[in-house]
Image: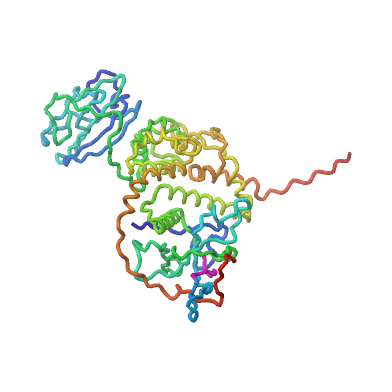
Amino acid sequence: MRQLGHTGSVPPGHLGQVPGIRLVSYDLKDQRQVVAMTSPAATYLLPELSELSLADTGTRAPSRGEINLLHGTVVIGAITKDEAESLRLHHWLSFPSSGFQWVPRMSSPLSSAPPSGEAPVADTASAPPAETWPPLAPGASVVAIASRIHGLSGLSDEELAAIFKVTRETFNRWRSGALNNPTPGSRRRLGLVLRVLEEGHAHGVNLKDWLLNTLPSPEGLTPYELLQKGHIEEVAYLAAELGAKDLQAQQASEEPLEDDLIFGDDDFWTSSDLEGVDDDVV
Amino acid sequence: MAYLPDDLYCHRLDDPQAGPHRPISQGDVFADIPLTGPAQRDAKQEDTWRAAKPRTGPKSFGMIVTHPCAGRSPSTNRLNPVLSVAPVVRCPSEWGPPWDGHLDLFPLPALRDASDYVAKLNEVGPMPSEAFEGHRIACLTSGGLTALYHRLARNSIRYPEIPAHFGTEAERLTNETDLWERWTEVRETEEGFQDWLSGDFEGQPEEDENGEPVAGTATASGQPRRAVLVWNIDELRRELEDELGTSRGEAEPPASPPDPT
């Protein structure tokens, strides 16, 4: 793993303590996919850059020592190249950081890369842009689940660790893959939280704000505080209310006409001798 | 879109009784029970209605649709005298997987004798709970209960989604019933379980940086066990086994001799 030019000290192979970085990849069809969502004080692996060629796509790969990230700026960097047909670019969106300065070399996505040296496009760091996170398939890895929880919630490793009663390091290792055998209880709890977050995300809710700042529960606790107490049922119930407006639109759609079904001879009622009465007497 | 898990049943038998130690609960299917039906118009007197004869016999099937909170006495935890039951009949041949449409029906594939059946959610009626004992032929899994909730919601109010809430509620109910079943299996009575469930949860141990539980870090937070039926089911199972292990088979201590003074 190569070390790029920077103003701070970066351990070999690590991006260092750069908060609020979102790694986004583009493929040749300009399909944008969020790879991971970072959080403050987290450490991420810096991808390989030097052997990559973007000549096929008309863009220029940043060279070693030229990649920097600044607050609110955007960087495109080539990370991996599987084959000539599947070059992937990774797009960093930086947020206020300390100890490191990274400046962008390129400022636009794959399909419309500007000439090198052009001023980067600042991104709105105040609110995460709407990303599409399709639900994970059943049986997803711990890495995928923990990373998705981290990305959807916007919470730090420390905040998430408090929910699962593990150390910050443990949750970080779940996300990095260094630890992939949580206890059965932790694995189950990861799945429970993921399910609730995916539902909230599907309704376009700012989950971090919802988790930390809303007080919908009768006890006056935020969803995050309810999760810390293990009240996942209450949080799931609250999450179900998030999509109320969407449901009204869905319910308005017409239902297809159905044919009457023909039941068997076990589905019948016959009359008794008892006549109905006017008052409510059983 | 219909939703029905592959693992619909946690107990299913072609003869009663499925899950002999399992407390009766929502989603349970019974055979040979008296089902009540809609009033019938008198054939001779047009303005007269007559009660339908209860449907009885070995092929008279029904499914409980009442939620347990409404189906049991809050003070004694015994079944209420009357529960809401949907008639269960053979599935019409023209309907099958993926079970789309016909929202008034809840599919019960391979319920009995490898035949498909359906619960008719539009014909739910009252049934005396004393008729259930010894007649159960199937119980639903957590996934099966989730599917039942979805079907009930779609039938009643056309609720289109399966929110996480349905799944957690189904899981909560299934976990409670599983623990209660274990209690009944060991103690040979349902009594006492709800009191134990209302007792203090002993806490979830913390895990170290390697994801291993750290002994001695579980601290009670003042929450009852029933508040964490979903989140801490693993810990609750251990607490239950501890509870059953310490009290099962122990002889009563000998009575103290009378005070001579």
Instruction: Examine the structure image and report whether residue A83 is included in the region drawn in magenta.
Output: no
**Front residue of this view, candidates B124 and A139:** B124
**Front residue of this view, candidates A72 and A99:** A72
- The residue at 58%/55% (across/down) is B72
Seen in the picture, residue B188 relative to A202 is either above or below; the reply is: below
Seen in the picture, residue B200 relative to A106 is either above or below; the reply is: below
Looking at the magenta stretch, what is its main secondary structure? loop
Q: Position of residue B142 (x, y in %)?
A: 46, 53
Q: Is residue B191 left or right of residue B119?
A: right
Q: Quadrant of residue B133?
A: bottom right
Could one spot residue A165 in this view of the protein?
Answer: yes
Image quadrant for the C terminus of chain A? Answer: bottom right
- The residue at 24%/20% (across/down) is A6
What segment is highlighted magenta in the picture? Answer: B29-38
Q: Is residue A201 left or right of residue B49?
A: left
Q: Quadrant of residue A37?
A: top left
